[in-house]
Image (cartoon, coloured by chain):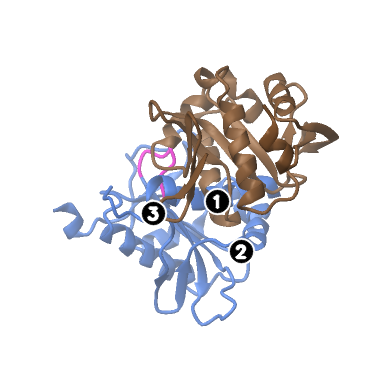
Amino acid sequence: MSHDTPSAAPSLTTERLCLRGHRLSDFDAYAAFYASERATHIGGPYTPSRAWASFAADLGHWVLMGFGWWIVTDKGDPGSHPLGTVGLHCPPNHPEPEIGWTLFAGAEGKGFAHEAAAGVLAWGWQHRIATSLVSYIAPANARSIALAERLGAHLDAVAPKPAHAPDVLVYRHSVPAEVCS
Amino acid sequence: MTLAANHTGHPAIETERLRLRAFRPGDDAAMIAFYASESSAFYGGPCEANDAWRKAAVYPGHWALRGYGPFALEERASGRFVGLCGPWFPLGFPEPEITWMLVEDARGQGFAVEAARAALAFAYATLGWVRAVSCINPDNTPSLRLAERLGAVHEYDTAVGSTPVGVWRHAVPAALETSP
């Protein structure tokens, strides 16, 4: 890791989105998502206290690792309301750094997750946060599998899996040539 | 006690033997080791590395969300991470409190009282708190003794999640400064 790694999420803009750091005002939407059945693919549902700890840890990831999570917003929205999260993370039980994404209720079906994830992948490679990136996806999570494939990732049947989730599928993102060299 | 700030604006405090500073890379490894031991029993442990890492990451995240939070404690003489202490107000707590935690081999040397006095002074003088408490599990005898030594008095009982806690109200600033 280089010495100038950020300790907070830098704002990134894509065609339609602004990706920014978590704010306390985002928490209710985050907690509602993690309390819902839609969070079952990613370890949920969470109680509000657990969601708060997870929300804070998403921020702390930046301080401890130099990369982490963003809140996805519509860049034309003056209220900057949270639409979901996207991020790069590498907790101890992950064999490799992962790019993950969630969209909150009502934000699906517009290509936002793809646009946000593509922006974060580009940032991650540009900042050399890792030499490999994967996405760990529950086999029943068809929408995330489709998104991983749309991002150019391929199923890696021999990749090591997180010990706590031996049934996940590992989608490996292709490494740009300049990162390999 | 001296108050300074690092390059990101995060305050740091030096006491006689300790540095209260921002969490940084490397502290997570010390927290994982702490949470692997029974000495973490009053802090939601023991637990495996992944859960311990997430607990560690909450502290710098709390700073980002609240604008304050627990400091990492570093022994000035050795530079080693010995625990954490400071203002703490995650969701589910009855009110903002001063929390503390020492790794096992840093206990019994008065580090907690030294850190807690500095954290209380920071909360009153810098954050403008007019009231400070600590929420303590009634079975956590060392922390109960520390609260008494700091001049705190038991005020009421409640629960944080499913854990019963006693809420101890700390002495006001004037009394803190004159305590032995």
Nearest the viewer among A36 and A7 is A7
Residue of label 3: B7
Residue of label 2: A26
The image position of residue A76, as x and y in percent, is 51, 82
Q: What colour do you see for chain B? A: brown
**Quarter holding residue A28:** bottom right
**Quarter holding residue A117:** bottom left
Q: Is residue B95 above or below residue A30?
A: above
Q: Secondary structure at mark 1?
A: helix
Query: Any mark on residue B63, and which?
Result: 1
The answer to whether A46 appears left or right of A124 in the picture is right
Can residue A152 be seen? no
Q: Chain of mark 3?
A: B
Q: Amino acid at mark 1?
A: Trp
Mark 3 or 2, closer to the camera: 3
Q: Few, some or many C-alpha atoms within 10 Å of disc 3 (few <14, some 14-19, many ≥20)?
A: few
Q: Amino acid at mark 2?
A: Asp
> Of helix, strand and loop, which mostly describes the magenta segment?
loop
Decide: marks 3, 2 in contact (CB < 8 A)? no
Can residue A36 be seen? yes
Q: Amino acid at mark 3?
A: His
Q: Do the dots labelled 2 and 1 sit on one chain?
A: no
Q: Chain of mark 1?
A: B
- Which range is magenta? A89-96
Query: Count the marks: how many?
Result: 3
